Every structure is written in C-alpha cells, then in structure tokens.
Amino acid sequence: MPDLLLRAANIHHAYRERAVLCGVSLEVRAGERVALTGPSGSGKTTLLNLLGGIDRPKSGRIEFDGVSLGDLDGDGLARLRRQSIGTVFQFFHLLPTLTASENVELPLQLVGIDASERRSRVAALLERVGVANRAEALSTELSGGEMQRVAIARALVHRPRLLLADEPTGNLDSRNGERILQLLRELSDETGTAMVLVTHSAEAAAICHREIRLRDGVIESSIRNSDPRA
C-alpha cells in the first residue's frame, strides 16, 4: 500500500463562531486522487485550505508526510507549499502584471530551478493544458477558461507531491474540461502526485480513487472507486 502522505484528524473549524467543520478526519496516500463533494456551504473549500496550510484549524491535527502543520511557523508553511504542494484556487490568483508563462514560471524561480529548466517545463505544461499560443499574453488578457488552465499549469510546474484543486474544471467547456481531467489523471499516474479535488462535477469525481462527501461540516460518506476512469 502506498505511503501515507496527508492525514487530518478530528478537524474543527469555525468562522465568527459559526461551525464550518465538525470533527472531520481523512487520510490521503501517495498517488491517490480524492474528490471532495457535497452541497455548497458544506465545508469543502475550507477543508482544502486547511489541508494546504493556508488556514489553521481551530482544533485537530493535520500532518503532511508525518510533519504536523501546527508545528510549522509561517515561513515553514510557505516553504512546504513552495516545495511540495500545488494549489489551484477557485479564482485563479494569477498575477496581473505577468504573462501566462511568467505566472507558471514563478514557482520554479522560488525554489531556485535554473533558467533553461524553467523554460522547458513551462513550455511543456502550457502545451499540455492547451494554451501554448497564449504564453506571452498578460493574465488580464486571458479568458476565464484560459486563466483556469494557466493556474493548473502553475500548480503542477514544480512537480508537487500533493495537488489541491478547487473546482479545477469549473470554468471550462466540456471539451477542455475533459482534456484537463485527462492531464490530471496522467500526471498523477506518471509522477505519483496525490490530488484532492473539490468538485461538483461527476466527471472529475470519476477520475478519483475515492469520493468523500461532506454535508454541514461532517463527512456524510466515503466511497471507493475501484476503477478510476480517464
């Protein structure tokens, strides 16, 4: 069985005393793809942010590769995210003054990858997500679907051990959505990258090994998919 990569135990979280997560526990193994599903307001995005160390839970413990996120200071969390975690945000968070290729290249600069390797990786990923022809466009000049694909390339370019994605196909038409899901599945299989995807899409859930359904801040069900499809 693959090594345990991510573990959340008895996670509670609230905003202004409003409970959002109530005792959530889950484990993700290396190379495993997990879909977080459930109605809006069930706590999916909050859980994703906690798993990535963007927020800290009110109580409970989250471990990445045996290291408790609660034991890391801000610099330690930032270093972990730069080196080992890729994140696709629902609203992209591309830097408006940078081109598409520069946005994708930025994570590689932060970890000190040399320039020729950076250019090679960026070009290859922009091609795979289908926006190579928009490499020199500013992010403000991109359509919503193009920004989504650039954000996915940026999250994958440093070859993270864990990808966290919030609605990774939410702004894409069916053809490009299918293309991105195929890419995520292929890269996960090729590199052993674990993935946790927040999604309302049955097609996205179908590429995952497990679907964890949240409702009102608790896990309602966890279903294993014995044959994740392309």
Image (cartoon, rainbow, N blue to C red):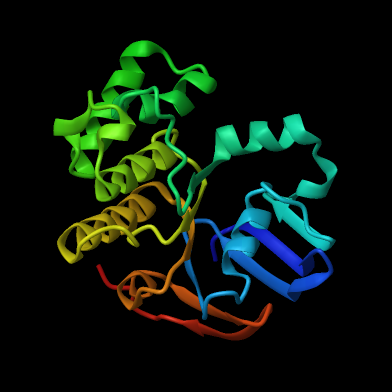
Q: Image point 31% across, 13% down: which residue?
A: 116
Quadrant occupied by the N terminus: bottom right
Relative to 205, is 203 on the left or the right? left
Q: Quadrant of residue 114?
A: top left
Q: Image point 66% across, 82% down: which residue?
A: 216
Relative to 19, is 78 on the left or the right? left
Q: Nearer the viewer, residue 24 or 58?
A: 58
Q: How many marks?
A: 0
Image coords of residue 190 (percent x, y): 34, 49
Relative to 81, is 157 on the left or the right? left
Q: Image point 47% across, 55% down: which residue?
A: 165
Image coords of residue 85 (percent x, y): 55, 43
* Residue 149 vertical placement versus 174 (above, below): above
* Residue 144 vertical placement versus 34 (above, below): above
Image coords of residue 223 (percent x, y): 50, 84
Q: Nearer the viewer, residue 155 or 15?
A: 15
Determine the residue located farthest toward the bottom in the rendered image: 220
Q: Image point 24% across, 36% down: which residue?
A: 126
Relative to 143, is 133 on the left or the right? left
